[in-house]
Amino acid sequence: MGTSSLNLRELLEDSVGLRTFYVDLPSRVAEMLAYAEVLGGCLAINRKHPEERRRLSPAHGYAHFLANRYRPEVAVTAKKPAGCCDQAPGSAPSRTPKGRGETERTGCTGCTG
């Protein structure tokens, strides 16, 4: 039995048609998703973010692609991720406190993560 490793980028591009790019984005932007009939889906991942976030972002972007590919999305973190640029450890998720147990999305609007 052989060992295989999942290459999510390859899978998304070859099987789904979701082009993935690793680019320099502002530190608060985790990923951006856009769709055009001519190009298909395009997902930009912030290459300045820590490896753990760069591994999560394609799966997160794919979920948004499945939910509503025709609506552009920008996933924004509340603060710069830990290990990114000059932010101290303890980054906040993409939700910020709103009051009385509610949260306000700071970018990503279709998931809980």
Image (spheres, rainbow, N blue to C red):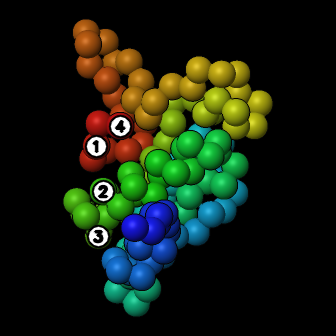
Residue highlighted by disc 3: 70
Q: Secondary structure at mark 3?
A: loop
Q: Are marks 1 and 4 in contact (CB under 8 Å)?
A: yes
Residue at image location 61% in from the left, 53% down from the top: 46
Q: Secondary structure at mark 2?
A: helix
Query: Which of marks 2 and 1 precedes in the sequence?
Result: 2
x and y, in percent, of residue 10 in the image: 48, 74
Return the residue found at the far top. 100
| Mark 3 and mark 1: Cα distance apart in space | 16 Å
Return the residue found at the far right. 86
Residue highlighted by disc 1: 111
Query: Which of marks 2 and 3 precedes in the sequence?
Result: 2
Judge whether residue 102 can be spotted in this image.
yes
Q: Secondary structure at mark 4?
A: loop
Q: Amino acid at mark 2?
A: Ala
| Mark 3 and mark 2: Cα distance apart in space | 13 Å
x and y, in percent, of residue 81 in the image: 61, 33
Q: Secondary structure at mark 1?
A: loop
Q: Are marks 1 and 2 in contact (CB under 8 Å)?
A: yes
Judge whether residue 34 can be spotted in this image.
no
Residue highlighted by disc 2: 63
Query: Which of marks 4 and 3 precedes in the sequence?
Result: 3
Residue highlighted by disc 4: 113
Count of numbered badges drawn on the protein: 4
Residue at image location 29% in from the left, 70% down from the top: 70
| Mark 1 and mark 2: Cα distance apart in space | 8 Å
| Mark 3 and mark 4: Cα distance apart in space | 21 Å
